[in-house]
Amino acid sequence: MAEETVIQKKEKGVGCRLRAWAAWVLAAVLVYVLSLGPVLKIEYSNGGPSSPVVDAFYAPLDWICSHNQSADVLMRWYLGGVWGVYP
């Protein structure tokens, strides 16, 4: 059995850390996007439109949906079809 050199071990460690970092970033983005549904459901169930803080926090999603028709259709399906919220 051939022994790995120190450099090979470090290269494997860097690749593993990079994949773990990328997975955490992807998970954070998914949580951010998918959290809009429950947040709007709570906001609308309290009798009104979303607050300025919620609007500011989710402004990047609003911008993406206003500039990308596919994202807009998907977000409208998610909010309306899954959460029953029609902003």
Image: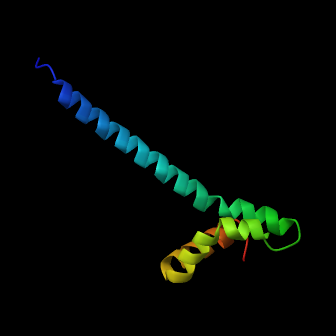
Image quadrant occupied by the C terminus = bottom right
Residue at coordinates 58% horizontally, 70% vertically from top-left?
A: 60
Q: Position of residue 59 (x, y in %)?
A: 63, 71
Question: Eyeballing the image, is 30 above or below 58?
Answer: above
Question: Eyeballing the image, is 16 above or below 41?
Answer: above
Residue at coordinates 16% horizontally, 23% vertically from top-left?
A: 4
Q: Position of residue 83 (x, y in %)?
A: 70, 65
Question: Eyeballing the image, is 17 above or below 5?
Answer: below
Q: Residue furthest top?
A: 1
Q: Quadrant of residue 54?
A: bottom right
Residue at coordinates 75% horizontally, 66% vertically from top-left?
A: 53
Q: Residue furthest left?
A: 2
Q: Position of residue 62 (x, y in %)?
A: 61, 75
Q: Is residue 22 left or right of residue 67?
A: left
Question: Eyeballing the image, is 70 above or below 82?
Answer: below
Q: Quadrant of residue 44?
A: bottom right
